[in-house]
Image: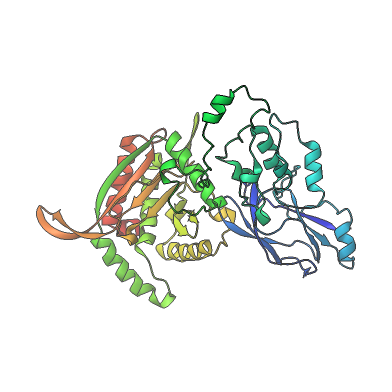
């Protein structure tokens, strides 16, 4: 019997994804462990591997299809010795492609899976308050988009589709206006007024959906948001709207840490390890969280979770967004190990090779924009965490040392704290501990 591959749940929060690319084609033989496709989740692009051996009999969801629900069929695999063409036309055996695929009936993906899709959707469509125009029947649109357009009185003929082969999908209807109803055959307007009424001016080409009127004539390119960018927008909006942020900034002298880093790198050169300033700051943050455990917490309604170790989420910029791989148990790891792990995580993050457990979780975050010359900034808390540390550039500044004005390398660090979970005094105690550890770095290595 043919095996039906389903859209896998590649993370605990994944409900749908984008089938970015097929790495096999119909007729290819695959073995267990072979990479079949690249799937874009709400946080990263990940590889989808085959579990069993067989031949790709039919690809049900084309590459580039968005909004494919977890559990939706995406391909049919013929078992060993089975005729692939016969398997493609027969009823497949509904088995899981991976163990973590959700057991639920999923909506059909927003793509032209089969020729039977359009008639089936038309048969299930409910009567709409506004009749669809004849042009609507000729345009390519998903059943959901067609149904929503009929309910809202939107003429699909005037909408450009962003789906596969120019197909109109739900997102294309955002900002579309209902079609103007045609004038009645018998108008009550008098002949005199009809003569006086000027002919309607030809309507200008519609501006890209969502543009304000004052920018409608400015050349613009409509860029479809990736799943990652949509998630970033949703989560950060949620954070700023629901989490009361409190910001605390300290200036930290870096000279001792920079000197220690140089000495450690000389000693680690034979092992091929080169510490960055950020590696040492990750260690300092973890140590400070252990000293001030009231900041290593998470707010959850009527409950406050206090963590027994420091798992530091480190912001890494990648193409199309930001991801936060985690250095787990950073308070108990040496700086050489933190450096090695961080380099590996950052490389795989940029290549889209991180596993979900490597970027989901974390008890606190750190974001360093010093390499861009940013002096200081306020970072947005990454829910459900309760704090994030924003690191600015180290720069030569006038600084008072032992009551004498001198020139020192100074770095500004700003902590953003969830005021529901962390009081200002506790946040201040954390920032003071972080400053002390960075200015006296041997203390965090002991």
Judge left or right: residue 308 versus residue 428. right
**Whole-percent x, y for residue 107 in the image:** 73, 43
In this view, the residue in front, 105 or 137, is: 137
x, y percent for residue 16: 65, 47
Horizontally, residue 306 falls left or right of residue 377, namely: right
Q: Quadrant of the N terminus?
A: bottom right
- The single residue placed furthest to the left in the displayed view is 404
Residue closest to the eye, 120 or 90: 120
Residue 207 is left or right of residue 60, and the answer is left
Residue 183 in the image: state x and y as whole percent: 64, 30
Q: Is residue 48 above or below residue 191?
A: below
Q: How many labels sit on residues?
A: 0
- Residue 419 to residue 74: above or below: above
In the rendered image, the quadrant that contains the C terminus is bottom left
Q: Is residue 169 left or right of residue 401?
A: right
Residue 61 pos. (x, y %): 73, 55
Q: Name the residue: 74% across, 67% down.
A: 25
Front-lying residue, 113 or 185 = 185
Q: Residue furthest bottom?
A: 270
Decide if residue 160 is in sight here. yes
Classify residue 89 by image quadrant.
bottom right
| Nearer to the camera, 349 or 74 | 74
């Amino acid at each position: 019997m043919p095996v039906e591959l389903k859209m896998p749940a590649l993370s605990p929060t994944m409900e749908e994804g984008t089938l970015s690319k097929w790495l096999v084609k119909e007729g290819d033989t695959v073995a267990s462990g072979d990479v079949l496709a690249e799937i874009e989740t709400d946080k990263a692009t990940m590889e989808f591997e085959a579990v069993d051996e067989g031949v790709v009999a039919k690809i049900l969801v084309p590459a580039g299809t968005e909004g494919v629900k977890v559990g939706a069929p995406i391909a049919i695999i013929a078992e060993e010795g089975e005729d692939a063409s016969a398997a493609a036309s027969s009823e497949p055996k509904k088995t899981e492609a991976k163990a973590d695929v959700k057991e639920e009936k999923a909506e059909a993906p927003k793509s032209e899976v089969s020729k039977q899709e359009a008639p089936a959707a038309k048969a299930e469509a409910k009567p709409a308050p506004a009749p669809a125009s004849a042009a609507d029947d000729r345009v390519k649109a998903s059943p959901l988009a067609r149904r929503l357009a009929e309910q809202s009185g939107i003429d699909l003929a005037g909408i450009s589709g962003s789906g596969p082969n120019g197909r109109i999908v739900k997102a294309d209807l955002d900002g579309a206006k209902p079609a103007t109803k045609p004038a009645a055959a018998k108008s009550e307007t008098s002949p005199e007024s009809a003569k006086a009424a000027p002919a309607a001016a030809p309507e200008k080409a519609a501006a890209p959906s969502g543009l304000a009127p004052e920018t409608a004539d400015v050349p613009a390119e409509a860029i479809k948001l990736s799943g990652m960018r949509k998630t970033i927008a949703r989560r950060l909006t949620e954070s700023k709207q629901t989490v009361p942020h409190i910001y605390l900034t300290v200036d930290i002298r870096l000279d001792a840490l920079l000197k220690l880093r140089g000495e450690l790198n000389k000693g680690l050169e034979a092992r091929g390890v080169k510490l960055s300033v950020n590696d040492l700051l990750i260690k300092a943050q973890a140590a400070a969280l252990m000293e001030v455990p009231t900041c290593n917490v998470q707010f959850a309604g009527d409950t406050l979770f206090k963590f027994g170790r420091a798992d530091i989420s480190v912001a890494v910029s990648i193409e199309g967004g930001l991801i936060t791989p985690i250095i787990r148990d950073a308070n108990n790891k040496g700086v050489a190990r933190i450096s090695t792990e961080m380099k590996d995580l950052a490389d795989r993050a940029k290549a889209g090779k991180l596993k979900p457990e490597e970027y989901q979780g974390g008890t606190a975050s750190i974001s360093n924009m010093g390499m861009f010359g940013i002096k200081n900034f306020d970072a947005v808390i990454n829910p459900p965490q309760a704090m994030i540390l924003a690191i600015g550039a180290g720069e030569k500044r006038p600084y008072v040392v032992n009551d004498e004005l001198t020139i020192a390398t100074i770095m500004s660090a700003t902590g953003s704290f969830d005021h529901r979970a962390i009081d200002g005094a506790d946040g201040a105690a954390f920032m003071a501990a972080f400053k002390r550890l960075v200015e006296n770095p041997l203390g965090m290595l002991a």
